[in-house]
Amino acid sequence: MVPLLRRSFDIRPGEGLPVLLSFLYIAAVVAAYLLAKPIRNGLYLEEYGPYALVYVYAAVPIILTVFVRGYSAVAARLGTRAVMVGTLVFFSVNVLLFWYAFTYHYVPLLSAAFYIWVNCFGVIAPVQAWSFANSLFDTRQARRLFGLIASGASFGAIAGGMLARFLVGPVGGAVNLLFVLALLILAAAGVVIVASGRTRRRGLMRLSRPAAPPVRRTFRDIWASPYLRHMAGLVFLVAVVTQWVGMQLNIEAAARYGGDADALTGFFGTFNFVLGACSFVVQLLATGRALRTFGLAVTILTLPLALGAGSALILLLPAFWPVVTTAALDQGLRFSVDRPTYELLYLPLAPAQRAAVKNAIDIVVNRIADALGAVMFGVATAGFVMLPGFGLGLRGTAAINTVLIAAWIVVAWRLRAEYVRTIQDSIHRHRLDTERASASTVERSASDALRAKLGGGDAGDVRYALDLLELQQARSWHPVLRELLHHPEPDIRRRALALLGAGGDRGIGDEAVRLLRDPELSVRTEALLYLAREMGTDPLGRIQELGDFEDFSIRAAMAAFLASPGPTQNLDAARAILAAMAGSDGPDGARDRAEAARLMALVPDEFPDLLSVLMADDDEGVARQAVRSARAAPREELAVPLIAALARPGLVDEAADALARIGPAVVPEIARRLRDDRENLEIRRELPSVLVRVGTAEAEGVLVDSLLHVDTTLRHRVIASLNKLRLVHPEIQIDQGALEILLAAEIAGHYRSYQVLGPLRGQLKDEDPVLEAMRASMEQELERIFRLIALIHPREGLHDAYVGLRAANPAIRANALEFLDNVLRPEVRPLLVPLLDAQVTVEERIAIADRVVGAPVETAEQAVVTLLASEDSWLRSCAVYAVGTLQLHALSGELGRIEETGDEALRESVRAARRRLAGEVRAGAPQEPPAPPEMGLNVGAG
């Protein structure tokens, strides 16, 4: 039975006990209230009549305002759950005192006092019960479970109605039912006591002694927030409308039963029983499903639309049964649909704020609305002692109520939008806090680490830090680098001087002159170059002064001197020297060529032909220096050698930056290369990063044309680049049809990955490289899906949601998922949300995949065959690896076909798998898995 309930109502492991306790708490409270309500109505209407109800409704807010102040103060000292138990015990004792007073010391005002007491209990106890439920579940759990939990209210209504209907006679009248009422309230207290020791609290209940902000500050916060203002407005309108519906029912019931207390108690008990039964069925069959499927967009409008129809019926036929029907719609839908929907509205609030706001709105605002509604009803109908009324009947009050319902619908519709915006604000704050903390930590740690390494005593650490600075072209390290000019290692002195010169530091001229006498020739050479480049010093004069310089130093210094701008510039002579250095070979050839490439940056526009040659140099250090000089010479004729440099991993970043500096002129060549399937794939994968740096509308157009590329790594980088460029050029119109086709394919592919993952999980260990490869690939698939959605729906919040889904805090993850559930298109939502919801298991996703994609994958062999057919070369390599690991001899023929068509890395994977199949590698022996590709631009969905 229990497993059936779990499946029917989507209860996940660990949720059963909190759901049961919440259900019982709400059921006991509502049963008590709906038992007290008929007793209250019967006693009061018998004594005073229906039109006197306006007086007791007006008195309730005064009592509740005093209660809220005291409740908040006590809760701050004792803790929320302790106060809940104390409040329920206090109410139970009150009931016994009322019984004693009604039995032995009856006075006419006692029924009025009891009416006020029941109204206060009907506000306070349900608010506490729903606060209890809010403390146990996050946004997503609440959306799944609040429909079931709210059925406790309907169950309580059934119980309360039955007790009032069938016990009023046997116990000796309405007054003696107060004993049953006291027991029900004590039962609710018992549930809270059990929950205190058996459930984990979250949100507003996590702290045992929550802070209690002043009531005035709470109302200032409500007024300052559009979301909370709309919530307060909704509560106000709901209270007035439902109060008027209840007044109409009391008037008609009193007229029908002649003011007989026991008859009225029986009628209202029967009414509550029937409505409770109907509500219970609605909640079990429809409410949970409606909340999960439609969310607030539909359920928040259900009650006002139903009451609008009921009021229209009263306008047409002002009689007893239309009034009963409208009241039935009110009570039935308020407990079954409207209440769980309304409680969801509190979950986006910060836990520290939630309790105070809930008390202020649900208790104070609600009862103020009751008071004003009562005054309005009195003025509209029979009036007051000193103030005559307008004498409106059922038709007149129904007309006014219809206007109020229209306002209710408008506020509810706007509140739904504010709900989504509030959730977005919460996940946006989380993203900003995360990025701020991450950036600050990374920047501070990187800066501290570099400074520590540069200033450390280990020469290896210093060299490593200098490598990073040379790669970054850093210009902000002059104070630290100057200290290295005295370092004992000559190569460190030389590199520090070179970096200072590249950074334009002209304050070390005296140090450079000192270094001309350094014991190491390379340091003296660097000092001579610095003086020639930065200080305009004639190198020949210095050389004659000092002597002991090699031919290389003389040539380099002369080239620097002749190429430097100024009256001594002679580019023809400089070209002759640099050309000779660029063609140098032999033991010191690489040194000459690298220095030539570095010197060409002095006059970047004059030597593009020489730079093109040096960028293709076999020595990576020479090629890197040439690329760096090309950054200072953004000329179109350098595009081809720079694109070729993208194939060399050590040059990628600097070559891409140098290409982007050429500007829009390079875009046509990049477009041609991206379209050419014969082009080196590694080069094509790097070209999107160049287009991002160019950042023009033409660059975005080229990326759009490359969206459907078969290579997953290239497609990933194209999509990521489009996300970034869309921020710069939001006016670009991308073919929505193509994007939606690609999104559907990516979602289907992601579900297919789950089908493949299922059988492999049963055959491989969790840390197996194949499973790790599958998970990494699926993470990339999910990122592509997010990025495509951001292109189709370029709205704020998707990046926030992407970051929020990866948060450690489950409440943030739930809010991110709830945001997506409210903003995604209906055709995408049911497919994508289960992929993101951490509460959906892998098995459930596989079941959805079998239904959506078809062709279930039932065995590990079928899973590997699917991977072998993948377009992703990395996954194919992993599948080959799995063939050997799982000893799938039947797939040896597939290995042969892959060996014939694959690249060298894939062929090596095939050979390793064959060795495993042949038993040349013992089972369980470690084997190097295929390395994943670098996807690049992995910056979330922004």
Image (cartoon, rainbow, N blue to C red):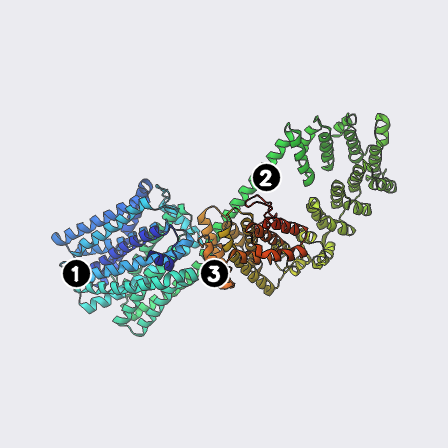
Q: From this viewpoint, which residue is outermost toward the bottom?
A: 316
Horizontal side, residue 90 vs residue 907: left or right: left
Helix, strand or loop for disc 2: helix
Regarding residue 941, the answer to whether it shows in the image is no
Three-letter amino acid code at the position of disc 3? Ile
Q: Residues within 10 Å of mark 3 (few under 14, many from 20)?
A: some
x and y percentages locating residue 676 in the rendered image: 71, 59
Regarding residue 526, the answer to whether it shows in the image is yes
Tell me the residue that label 1 is attached to.
168
x and y percentages locating residue 223 in the rendered image: 41, 51
Q: Earlier in the sequence, mark 2 or mark 1?
A: 1
Three-letter amino acid code at the position of disc 2? Glu
Q: Residues within 10 Å of mark 1 (few under 14, many from 20)?
A: many
In the rendered image, which quarter is residue 336 located in?
bottom left
Tell me the residue that label 2 is attached to.
443
Helix, strand or loop for disc 1: loop
In the rendered image, which quarter is residue 403 located in?
bottom left
* Gap in angstroms between the C-alphas marked 3 and 1: 53 Å
* Gap in angstroms between the C-alphas marked 2 and 1: 75 Å
Q: From this viewpoint, which residue is outermost toward the left?
A: 104
Q: Look at discs 3 and 1 and give the one toward the viewer.
A: 3
Q: Nearer the viewer, residue 58 or 412?
A: 412
x and y percentages locating residue 791 in the rendered image: 58, 58
Residue 317: image tag: none
Q: Residues within 10 Å of mark 2 (few under 14, many from 20)?
A: few
Tell me the residue that label 3 is attached to.
848
Helix, strand or loop for disc 3: helix
